[in-house]
Amino acid sequence: MQVPSVFQPIVDLADGSLFANEALVRCKHEAFASPIGLFEHAVAEGATGRLGRTIRDGLFEVCPPAPIFVNLHPHELQDRWLVQPDDPICFHDHQVYLEVTESATLDYYDLCVSVLKEVCDRTGAYLVVDDLGAGYSNLIRVVDLQPKVVKLDRALITGLDTSKRKQILVKNLVVLCVELGATVVGEGIETVDELKAVMDCGVQLGQGYFLARPGAPPPPVKWPFPAAE
C-alpha cells in the first residue's frame, strides 16, 4: 500500500526563496480522507508505526530534491519503526526535519527525549516543534528538547495584522526562540497583510495558502514583493 503525499513550500521571508517543503498526507480512500481519521484508525489497530513507515517510503520516492519536513504521530515513538537503520530519512540527500506537535512533546515528553534524540543524533535530522502557542503552556519542556525549528500555531497568525496583543506575543515568542537557537515559522498565512505582520514581528520563515498551496509537485512560491537587487 502506498499513501500519497503532497508538498507545501516553507518560505524564507528574507527574500521569498524556498527553505524546505513539508510533506502532507492525502489518502485517496474515502473513509480516510482526513489524515486525522487515518491515524486514529491506525492507533486503534496498533499500526501507527507501520503506517508512518509506509508514508515515508512513499513520500521519499517522489519528494523534490530539497530539505523536507516530515510529520510524526506521537504513537510512532512507541514503536521501533522510526529507529530502523533502513528508514528513508537516513538517505535523503538534503536536510530532514522531523515535526511533532507541541502537545505531543508534552504528553510524550520522555519518548520525545529518548527516541527523537536517538534518531536525530544518528541521522543528522533536526527536530521541529509544531503548533507552539496552541494552548499548551509548558515552554520549559519545549525548550529542553532544543528544537531546531519552532512553528507558531496558526491561531497566532490569523488576524495578526489587526491584533496588537497578538503582535506583542508573537514578537516576544520570536525573541525567545531565536535566543534559544531555534528558527521560527509562521503557519497559516492567508493574506498579504498577515504576511507583512509576520515579517514585522521578526519571523524568519512562512507557510500558508497565500504563499503556496500544497501540491505534487510543490507549486512555485507566490512572493508579492520586488526581488532584491
Image: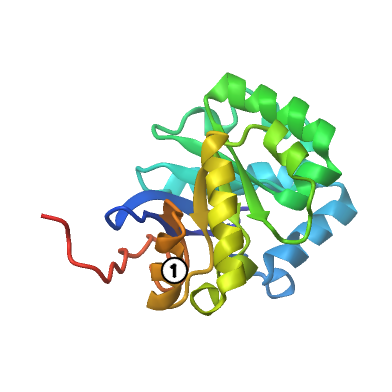
Residue 201 position in % (x across, y down):
46, 59
> Of the residues shown, which amino acid type is indicated by label 1?
Ala
Element under disc 1: helix
Of residues 180 and 158, the one drawn nearer to the viewer in this rendering: 180
Report the side of 44 relative to 184 (left or right). Answer: right
Residue at 27% from the left image edge and 55% from the top image edge:
15
Task: Read off the residue under disc 1.
Answer: 197
204 versus 194 height, above or below: above
What is the quadrant of the C terminus in the image? bottom left
Residue at 57% from the left image edge and 62% from the top image edge:
168
Label 1 packing within 10 angstroms: few (<14), some (14-19), many (20+): many
Residue 19 position in % (x across, y down):
37, 48
Of residues 98 and 203, the one drawn nearer to the viewer in this rendering: 203
15 versus 138 height, above or below: below
Report the side of 139 relative to 151 (left or right). Answer: right
Of residues 102 and 95, the one drawn nearer to the viewer in this rendering: 102
Report the side of 15 relative to 171 (left or right). Answer: left
Res. 57 visible in picture: no
